[in-house]
């Protein structure tokens, strides 16, 4: 397994997030280095997704900032995004495209070059062998989630993964597979942030935890 | 970066082919609106010849507005837009690629079918070229301006009405200049001045609108 080395740290400093009238969290901070896993827990509506969106630069925090290698990610923009894999709540799957086409588009947008053979392998790894050519319209919710997560199998070179509820809609076998992918990636020296309700069995050298309080 | 832009255009065209009813709706709307005029106005050739450029241009403008809602809405709903915002390609370029794909399926067909429709107005064939050229230069401007409006109103309730209100005032100069090109060609003044103006508008909109739309997208997805 090839190690990724020299990964800069992701630092969140004094984050506050206000949505409408509600303050979801205030004074939140963490430092995530390579080889570490950050699990964000909390009840529904406690701001897990907002925190993840702030961490990847989609959402501007009300106060505070997120730094990558000491530099604010809102300034780094593409420089930061080319190192990042974000799998959000929404699968980013087009119903009229096949699983393989969807995966190809997702990889190309993220700047990952993937050959058709690699795409087939990645889909097979997530248990979608035989479904490559089917339009996503006929796939089940779980199979669509698997298609979205198949990106992870092609993104071993990306030093930071941010995953929002990766296990939602997945069956036991797929959860196992994704957990293995994450564990491998962390042991490779990369950093992973994820939210989940499951007590995930991911063996990582260092696991950080943030639990957001519902208010 | 070129790979990503190529991929966006290819994907949007592929989606348009697989969901061709959306594209045909716009084209049909254009054909129907233009064809109803000779029926409603009556068979006076002189009158029809005069109103032809205006009618075709107004119909093209309305048809292009009809298609605007779709520019980012589907990508926003299924999360693809987030991936574009986090992509390695500068967002302005991605937006430009999307606008180009959008124009290819909703603007170019109007340009290509316009000479056939102009025949219903007994529009002189000599000036068909000017009419087509004015649409060829003008419809991309409509798509580019519309992209800013579509990005600003993304995810709002009642976005359709707001979008029309936002972009219509900006569409008016394009309409006046565009329809004016064919009209002055017919009246013997030559349409070059208007065509050059349209070209200038296209260059200006092409250079700035994608970046403005990109900023609007970042704001409306927060």
Image (cartoon, coloured by chain):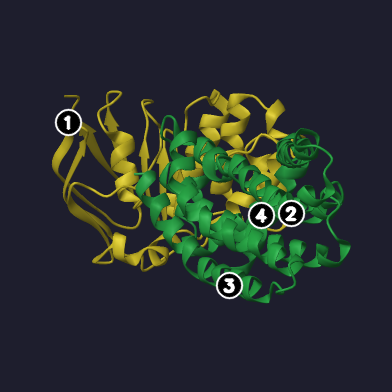
Q: Earlier in the sequence, mark 3 or mark 2?
A: 2
**Chain for disc number 1:** A
Pair 1/4: label in front? 4
Q: From where the camera sits, is residue A188 visible?
A: no
Pair 2/4: label in front? 2
Where disc 2 sits, the SS reads helix
Q: Which residue is mark 4?
A: B103
Q: Position of residue B25 (x, y in %)?
A: 72, 36
**Chain for disc number 4:** B
Q: Residue at x 55, y 58 (%)?
A: B144
Q: Marks 2 and 4, Cα distance to the nearest angstrom?
A: 28 Å
Where disc 1 sits, the SS reads loop
Q: Marks 2 and 1, Cα distance to the nearest angstrom?
A: 58 Å
Query: Where B136 sits versus A12, above or below?
Result: below
Q: Nearer the viewer, residue A213 or B167?
A: B167
Q: Colour of chain B?
A: green
Q: Which residue is mark 1?
A: A21
Pair 3/1: label in front? 3
Q: Marks 1 and 4, Cα distance to the nearest angstrom?
A: 41 Å
Q: Which residue is mark 2?
A: B50
Query: Where A80 sits versus B18, above or below?
Result: below
The answer to whether the residue labelled 2 contacts the one labelled 1, judged by CB atoms less than 8 Å apart, is: no
Q: Residue at x 58, y 40 (%)?
A: B70
Badge 3, how many Cα within 10 Å: few under 14, some, many 20+?
Answer: some
Q: Which residue is mark 3?
A: B197
């Amino acid at each position: 397994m090839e190690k990724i080395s020299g990964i800069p740290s992701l630092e969140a400093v004094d984050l506050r997030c206000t949505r409408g009238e509600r303050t979801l969290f205030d004074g939140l901070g963490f430092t995530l280095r390579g080889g570490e896993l950050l699990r964000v827990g909390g009840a529904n509506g406690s701001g897990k997704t907002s925190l993840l969106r702030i961490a990847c630069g989609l959402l501007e925090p009300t106060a505070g900032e997120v730094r990558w290698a000491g530099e604010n990610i809102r300034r780094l923009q593409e420089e930061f995004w080319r190192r990042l894999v974000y799998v959000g709540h929404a699968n980013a799957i087009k119903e009229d495209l096949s699983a393989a086409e969807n995966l190809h588009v997702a990889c190309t947008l993220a700047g990952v070059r993937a050959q058709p053979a690699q795409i087939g392998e990645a889909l097979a790894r997530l248990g979608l062998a035989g479904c490559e050519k089917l339009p996503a319209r006929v796939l089940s919710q779980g199979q669509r989630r698997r298609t979205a997560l198949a990106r992870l199998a092609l993104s071993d070179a990306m030093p930071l993964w941010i995953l929002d509820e990766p296990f939602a809609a997945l069956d036991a076998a797929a959860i196992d597979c994704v957990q293995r992918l994450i564990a491998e990636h962390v042991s490779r020296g990369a950093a992973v942030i994820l939210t989940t309700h499951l007590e995930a069995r991911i063996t990582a050298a260092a696991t950080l935890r943030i639990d957001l309080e519902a208010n | 970066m070129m790979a990503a832009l190529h991929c966006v255009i290819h994907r949007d065209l592929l989606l348009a082919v697989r969901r061709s009813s959306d594209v045909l709706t716009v084209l049909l709307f254009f054909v129907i609106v233009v064809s109803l005029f000779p029926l409603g106005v009556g068979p006076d050739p002189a009158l029809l010849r005069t109103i032809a450029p205006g009618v075709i241009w107004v119909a093209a403008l309305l048809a292009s507005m009809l298609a605007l809602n779709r520019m980012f809405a589907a990508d926003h709903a299924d999360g693809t837009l987030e991936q574009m915002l986090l992509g390695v390609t500068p967002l302005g370029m991605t937006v430009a690629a999307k606008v180009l794909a959008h124009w290819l399926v909703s603007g170019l067909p109007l340009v290509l079918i316009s000479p056939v429709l102009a025949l219903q107005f007994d529009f002189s064939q000599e000036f068909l070229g000017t009419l087509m050229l004015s649409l060829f230069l003008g419809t991309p401007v409509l798509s580019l301006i519309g992209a800013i409006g579509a990005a600003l109103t993304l995810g709002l309730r009642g976005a359709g009405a707001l979008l029309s209100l936002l972009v219509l005032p900006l569409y008016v100069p394009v309409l006046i200049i565009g329809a004016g090109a064919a009209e002055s060609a017919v009246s013997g003044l030559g349409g070059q001045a208007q065509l050059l103006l349209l070209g200038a508008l296209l260059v200006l909109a092409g250079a700035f609108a994608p970046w403005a739309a990109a900023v609007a997208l970042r704001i409306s997805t927060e």
